[in-house]
Image: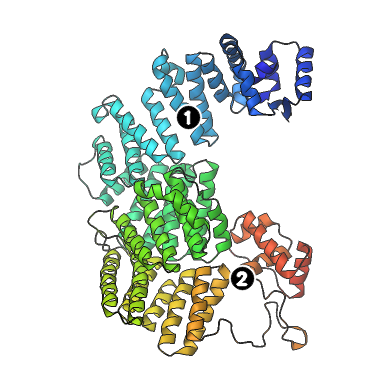
Amino acid sequence: MLRAAAVTGRRVNDELARQASGLAGPEYDDAVREAVAHQLLVQDDEHGYAFRHALLREAIYGDLLPGERTRLHARLAELLADERRLAEVPGTAAELAHHSLASHDIPGAFAASVAAGREAERLAAPAEAHRHYDLALSLWERVEDPEKLSGMGRGKLAFRSALTAADDGDIPRAVHQLRRLIAFLGEAGSDDPGLFCRASERLSYFLLDIDEDSEAIAAAEAAVALLSMEDVAPARSRAEQALAAARAADAIWVEADSLVTLGQLSEWAGRFEEAVGLFTRALQQARSATVLGVELRAAFQLARAQLESGDLVAASRTAHEGVQRAEDAGVGLAPYGYDLQYVHYLAHYQAGEWVHAQVLADGFATRVTSAAEARLSAMALFLDVARDQAAVAERRTWLQPFFITDHFTEYIGRGLLAEHALWHGDLETAVAEAEATIGASEKWEAGHRLPNVIRPAAVGLCALADQAWQARAAGDAKRASAAAEKASRLVRIAREGAAYPSRPSSVLGVDGRGWLARAEAEWRRAQGDNDPAAWQAVADAFGPVFVYETARSRYRLAEALAEAGRREEAQQELLLAVEVADRIGARPLRSALADLARRARLSERAAPRAAAGRGGAQPGGAAARSPLAGLTDREIEVLRLLAVGQSNREIGAGLFIATKTASVHVSNILAKLGAASRTEAAAIAHAQGLGPPASRNR
């Protein structure tokens, strides 16, 4: 019995093991009872058992004679090949492939591997699907009439293998397989023009994701060459041709894909509202056509545009819905799957909703093994750096190998490590990392400055302005002049990026305008002109929606006002920045504000005044502190919903946050109120006059 169980696997299906063992019912039951009594097997679920230790199973399996092992695998394959079981029990095809291969039944292993790949795709398990398709490909030449067994040609099987690799986030593997497939199909796809065209289009798509732009263009041109279109046409003309063809063929998903492309072209031409309208239409059509790839592309472009325009609530909603669709389909690390993840995270980060942003960042792997994971881990540095968390060091260690191979990871990672060095006073490292980040940006589009150079240039300018200030304080005019000269070079880079020479009609988003204003203000500071008006322009550019960046700008504004002798205004700006830094947990910023308060002899706390708490006037007009005064704005929103009896799941849905985040907020509220239960917290809320929330769209 144990031999049959060992061949079955770590988890043992009771009925399969009984039939494979050849024992009669009573004999088998006695054997199982004895194995359980001796703690060799433990009950796993209602249908079977598991070996208590994997090593025990390996020892029994290794003790089997070769012929005995093969016969048991063959018997299990025979049992698993039952059509009803294959149709009703998930994972059966994968088990059948394993046992068929182990029993040297190559045709059976091949057919079962293809079936297992299809099943894994249906179950949203792209990594498993890719593994099964790869196994089938490796067996192709060892099988007679493989097309009949698999129901597809070798090229199509290779194509599906490549697509599932991409769905799992392994873009380099997908690119490698598609290149081999195109070579297999022959020049111009003479063996299968349709598949050649599809493979070339996907290859172009994936090459863009890994920043191999020239190769991507060549692959796209190879695909287009097979279509009955003119050889040369502007991008908008191509997109409009695709849109017309899609409508003529009633291909809704192709129409949606064309609308996304037209939206991008409109955005580059400076027609932002038109672009958002096209992205919105594309998303609606892709959803109605139930074509996930196009839906995720449209969702990402719409969420990104909403984020850049400062509509953070809409960006969060769009990205959140897209992430859910991607994760349900098992493609969270595929192109646009991980893109939507970081847009969702950035929307909460920029809005100052750092509790929820931290929950999302905690889901981004630290010990990364793929480019997609590395890109998300680099994004997590936004919070890690802004909160000065210990995770910065570990993330840096795991990200550094990807700085060599992935431009996106290098750009995000190095840019934030520059800010980390800046907060810690390591100005030389901050400048070096900022320049390396600019270098990473320049790899995307050789010969042109992109807007994404603005932020690292501004970070480098801040470090150089600090160096110039220190040099002037020490009376070192030569060093101050050198820092100012370097600053002039960096501000020119920022201005060139803002001009976007390759797309001169495009318009910078809120974040881009804010960072450009910061670059200009830092450049003036490096020249010895710390102008309050320049820092007011930075705060105005970011506006109240970009909570953290506005608080950072207020810190510099307060400093400039204090230097100008405008102490009352400096005090007001400092207090506004302190409130935000305390609320969101921005420790480096808070430390800088404390240092400024000490240096400028400003107060870090508002002067005491008689005022009502959040819950309304105190009884008898007393100035006693309201129990709700210690709650953040987000916690007040959560308490309102808790007080009307909503669960954590309902609170999360109502406030567009994860259930886990809602649970964290509730725990914090109970602790701050000293309440022993949700009921007691609700009673406190009612006693303080905290009414139900006004209805609003998520």
Residue at 41% across, 63% down: 308
Horizontally, residue 603 falls left or right of residue 160, namely right
Q: Position of residue 109 (x, y in %)?
A: 50, 18
Q: Position of residue 296 (x, y in %)?
A: 45, 47
- Disc 2 vs disc 1: Cβ atoms closer than 8 Å? no
Within 10 Å of disc 1 (Cα), the crowding (few <14, some 14-19, many 20+) is: some
Real-space CA distance between mark 2 and mark 1, rounded to the nearest whole angstrom: 48 Å
Task: Tell me which corner region of the image, top left, top right, bottom left or bottom right, holds residue 507.
Answer: bottom left
Q: Which residue is mark 2?
A: 633
Which of the pair 433/657 is nearer the observer? 433
Q: Which residue is mark 1?
A: 131
Image position of 405 with respect to 153: above or below = below
Which of the pair 431/279 is nearer the observer? 431
Q: Amino acid at mark 2?
A: Asp
Residue at 54% across, 14% down: 103
Q: Residue furthest top?
A: 67
Q: Position of residue 246 (x, y in %)?
A: 36, 42
Q: Amino acid at mark 1?
A: Arg
Task: Please tell me which of labels 2 and 1 falls first in the chain.
Answer: 1
Closer to us: mark 2 or mark 1?
A: 1
Image position of 153 with respect to 237: above or below = above
Q: Position of residue 349 (x, y in %)?
A: 50, 62
The C terminus, quarter of image: bottom right
Under circle 1, the secondary element is helix
Residue at 54% across, 73% down: 580
Within 10 Å of disc 2 (Cα), the crowding (few <14, some 14-19, many 20+) is: few
